[in-house]
Amino acid sequence: MAGSRPSKPRNTSGAAPRKNDAPKGARPSGARPTGGRPSGSKPSGPRTGSAQPSGSSAFGKPKQAGAPTKSGSGPKAGIPRWSDQGATSDSGSARPRPTSPKSDTSQRGLTLAEKLKGMKFKPTPRTPKNADGTPNTSPGARGPRPFTPTTRTGKPIVRGQQAPKTPPKDPNIIRLNRYVANAGVCSRREADLYISSGNVTVNGKVVTEMGYQVRIDDAVRFDGRLLNPVKREYILLNKPKDFPLTTRTESGARSATSLVGNASKSILKPVGKMENKSMGLVLFTNDEALIKRLNKPKNGLKKIYQVTLNKPLKKTDLDAIAEGVLIEGIPQRVQEISYVDDKPKTEIGLEVWSSKHNMIPTLFEHLGYEIVALDRVYYAGLTKKDLPRGHWRPLTKQEVINLEMIQ
C-alpha cells in the first residue's frame, strides 16, 4: 500500500529480529553494532530472560536439537552443576540439590571400625609365598610362633609350678688357678702361666691342664711349697675403749672381734694383744704366717701411742723414761718420748718397738702415774687416717706387701 510503513523481517521463530541478530559474517570487522554498550562499560541493569527466546543463541542463531554445546558454555550431560542450587524450574518450585559422593554426609562422625562394619568384604591374611611362587604353608610362615617358657633341659614350664632348681655347687671344689691365687702366690692369670709351665703339683702329680678343679683338702704345692687355699684377708680396726680382743666372751657381750665379724667369711684373728681399756689400731687376719712374724719380741715393729695421764708428767720423770727405767731388774726402754704439741702436760707421745703389750702401763705405774686413756695411733706403717673409732677397712695391696717384708 502506498504510503504505508514497510514491515520488519521476521526470523524463523516469528519474532522481530534484534539489531545484534545479524550473522557474524554480515558485520564488518572491527565495527560494533549501533546501540551497543561501549567497551569497558557495564550494563545499567540486569538482563531479563524475556529478551531472548528459547531455542535461539545470543546472536539469533537457532540451536538444533541434540547439538553439543561449547566447552565451558554449559553443563555436560549427566553431571549436575553446583550453580543450579536455588534455581527455579518452569513451575516456580526450587530444584532439588543433586547428590554426589562428595556431598554424602552419612559417613561423617563414624570411626574407622564403624565404617568397616558396613563393608561387604572381609580382609583375609596374606599367604606368604616361597621363592618359586608357590604358597608357603609351613607352621611358622604366617608369623612368629607363640613363646613357650621352658626349663634348661627344654621341658615346658607348667603355669603354677616352679622350675626345678639346679643343685648348688660344692664349695669344697674350686679351680686350680683360684686355689693358687687364694694362697697369695699370684693372680689367677699369672697362676695359669705357672700351671702350664709345670710349677704346680696336686697330690704329688704335675698338672698342666687349664680349668683343672681340686678339692680344698688336696695337697697343692707351688715349687715344692705347700699352699693354703683359704683367701688371705687383712682388716684394720680402730678399736674403741672397753672392747676386749678375745673371742671368748659372754653371751651378748661386745668385743672387738664382733666388730669385724662381717668383714670376711673366714675366721680372723687379732695380731698381738691389747688391754680392754686401751684403744686404737688392731690388725685382724687369717694369715697365720704373718701373725707369727709380727708377734716376735724382736722384729723392730714400730708402734706409736698417745697416753693421757691423771696428772702432768714431770720433766725429771720424762727424762728418766727416755734413759730407761729398771723395773724388777729388767730395763724398760722406749725409742722416743715427748709432750704432745699444743696439749697439756698430761698428754704424752711414746714410740715403742717392743712387742710387750703391758710395758707402758707398768712403766707409768712404777713412777706413780695413772693412765686415763691409751690410744695406739700408729702400727707397723698403718695409721688412723680416715678411720673413725669403731670402724674397720681392708688393707691395700701395697700395705700388705709392706707387712710381708717384715721378718
Image (cartoon, grey):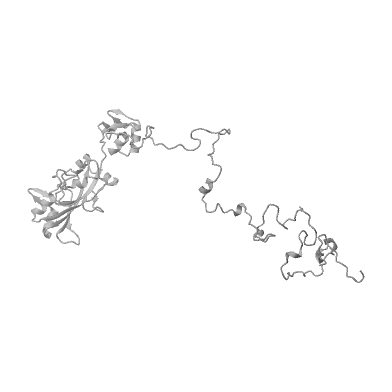
- Front residue of 15 and 198: 15
| Left or right: 314 as drawn, with respect to 42 | left
Q: Residue furthest left?
A: 328
Q: Residue furthest front?
A: 1
Residue plotted at (70% across, 56% down): 75
Residue 403 in the image: state x and y as whole percent. Answer: 24, 45
- Front residue of 199 and 203: 203
Instruction: Specify the quadrant that holds the N terminus.
Output: bottom right
Residue plotted at (29% across, 45% down): 397
Instruction: Specify the quadrant that holds the C terminus.
Output: top left
| Left or right: 233 as drawn, with respect to 63 | left
| Left or right: 149 as drawn, with respect to 85 | left
Q: Is residue 301 visible?
A: no
Residue 208 in the image: state x and y as whole percent. Answer: 34, 30
Q: Is residue 240 visible?
A: yes
Q: Residue furthest right?
A: 2
| Left or right: 347 as drawn, with respect to 87 | left
Residue plotted at (9% across, 50% down): 326
- Front residue of 284 and 323: 284
Number of callouts in the render? 0
Residue 4 in the image: state x and y as whole percent. Answer: 89, 70
Residue 14 in the image: state x and y as whole percent. Answer: 82, 62
